[in-house]
Amino acid sequence: MNQVNEAVTLSEIVNIPYHCLRRTGDNMRTVNPSQEDDQKLIANIRATGAVLQNLVVTPLDDEEGCYGVNAGGRRFGAVGVLVKDGVFPDDFPVPCRVQTGGSRSAVSVAENLKAAVHPADEFNAFKKMRNDGMEVATIANHYGISEFQVHQRLKLAQVAPMILNAYRRGDIELDTVMAFTLAENQKAQTALFKDLGGRCLAWQVKRALTNETVRSDDRLVKYIGLDAYKDAGGKVLADMFEDYDHICDFELVEQLAGEKLTKAAERIRKCEGWGDVFTTLERHFHVYDAYVRMQPDSVNVPDELNERIAALNTARDRICDEDDWSEESEDQLGKVDDELEAAEKERDGYRAFTAEQKNAGVLVATINHNGKVEYDRGLMTKAAARAAKSKENKASGGEETVATATLPQALLTDLGSHRQQIARVAMLSNPSLAEDVLLFALVQNVIGDYWNGKGINLRAESNEPMDERFRETDAAVAWAKAKSKLFLEFKSADGEAAQFAALRKLTPKRKQALLTFCVAACFETGLMREDESLNELIIETMAPDYAEHFRPTDAEYFKRLKRDGLVELGEKLFGAEFEERKKWKKGQLVTFFHDFFNKPLPSDLDEETRAKYESIRAHWLPDGFLNPAG
């Protein structure tokens, strides 16, 4: 009879020494499972000291007393590893059933077609073992996994039965079950599961449970410490399936961080002698938005060093003034700049803030993305800086334009034209202000002092920039667009009397638009000056969005600065990040600044750096643009 068609017959279980067993080609398991699964099986057999499920074997014709393994190849292989490692002896007894009839391949197939245990059943099995009194370490050793993995399975076993059943049916994935472990109890889990309609995704569950939380690796949480937060009564939502937990009371975090930062900064302020301290929890706080930087005084600089710097500056000016500029000139200038930079860096080593500067200065304290305190020293509020500058100007009898003394006069003129264009556009959105400006100018002209400031040109002449380059700026385009929307049909009437009569019939809204446009056209300003308080008050009221209409480019701005000015700008905007670029030639610096302000940022920037750079691009403007409140 064909043995393949015979019924499979098996003996009772007998123990056969490991060295008498051989792997055969009838075993279906021709490739090993993943290494992790193998390790779990080996650990289980090592922990129990026995093979709990028998093998199926048949006698070998060519080796008396030996048997071929038809089913149970993985268990046989696991015992072999333990024998090789010296854990088990060579004659380790392996439970077997001897097949005496039927297909040996069929036995292998039948064993390997067994349904795998569903993970949800595995979770419950772990829970039952724990309830029966088995220690976590024992369970971990038994299954060849870590104790933390055991705790994860026990956590999953506590999820509401309704959710685990949905997982068994395939309605939800395992990561969704994991997300439900963030809920306080099974009642809350079930309620949320029903609210989400049953077939939900992990992100939907997490969003519902952690909507008003922050991660435990947030910079402020790092700063105060998780234990300090908990000691203050803060609640933590533990997540066993992520590298972080969820902090539920961020207001408490900010309160604790603010208190700790204030105390730390105050200690430094007193120790170093600063006049004031400013602390902020803002992540992307930029000191140039509210402060100006003081320059420390040079103390005991050697005369030889000062003389060398003076000589290098003279040589630099001579090269820059050459009419016939060549590559040789560029190379000479580069060498002089390098020597000058080295000398100035040496002189910087002699700089220190005086007691007077510290008393007038502010110590700014922030918290970086690593949860560490960063101190910025030598700052002064813009209001204090303006007051000091005004006092200095009065003492010297000068009227220097605010913070712009180092810029070329032609560039200052152009920047003033840009500022006036933008201010006029801003006034178009402030009709009530335009009416007040006009009324004030009329009063000053008719019943006041004609020579006092009036804010606008009462000769009613439009203050258009003379240079044709300003006819295509963003502000000029916005101005032209506003003008095109004015209702000017009354001007087509025959004669001024008829035109006036037609104007009187215009709606109040159209009259107001005409009045606002004409007042804005007559508005006079330039770069900010301390002696133009009326104009600056008007501009402050309008709060023009300068950055919307003016972005610095190579031709309009950066090429017109000296190399020293470019380096100073880089230090102001980027701080220590700019250190290596300070060695660049002027052409390289011009290209860098133009690309930074006018081209897309690199795609590989981290989140914090990108946010910082975007803020600089959106807010920085040349000195003299911002109004006194700026």
Image (tube, rainbow, N blue to C red):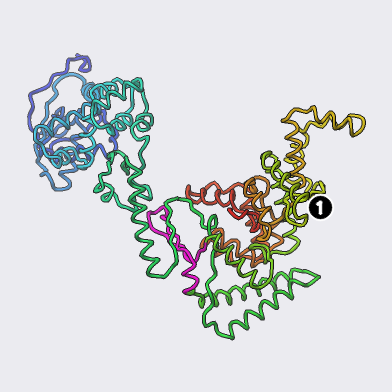
> Does the magenta run of residues contain 126?
no
- In-image side of 311 versus 301 (left or right): right
* Mark 1 crowd level (few <14, some 14–19, many ≥20, 10 Å Cα): few
Task: Identify which residue, 82 or 442, lies in the foreground.
Answer: 442
Task: Identify which residue, 98 or 441, lies in the foreground.
Answer: 441
- Total labels drawn: 1
Q: Residue furthest front?
A: 447
Mark 1 is on which residue type? Asp
Q: Secondary structure at mark 1?
A: loop
Determine the image quadrant of residue 406. bottom right
Q: Position of residue 567 (x, y in %)?
A: 61, 65
- In-image side of 260 versus 585 (left or right): left
- Residue 305: tell me if it is visible: yes
Q: Residue at x 22, y 17 (%)?
A: 4
Q: Residue at x 58, y 86 (%)?
A: 303
Instruction: Work out whether 77 lies above or below 577.
Output: above
- Residue 77: tell me if it is visible: no
Residue at numbered disc 1: 467
Q: Position of residue 212 (x, y in %)?
A: 37, 37
Task: Identify which residue, 261 or 48, lies in the foreground.
Answer: 261
- In-image side of 87 versus 573 (left or right): left
Q: Position of residue 403 (x, y in %)?
A: 63, 63
Task: Identify which residue, 136 or 341, lies in the foreground.
Answer: 341
Q: Position of residue 248 (x, y in %)?
A: 32, 40
Q: Residue at x 12, y 26 (%)?
A: 98
What are the residue bounds of the magenta stretch?
355-380
Q: Residue furthest right?
A: 494
- In-image side of 246 versus 4 (left or right): right
Instruction: Work out whether 90 lies above or below 223.
Output: above
Determine the image quadrant of residue 275. bottom left
Which part of the image, by quadrant, shows the N terminus?
A: top left
> Does the magenta run of residues contain 377?
yes
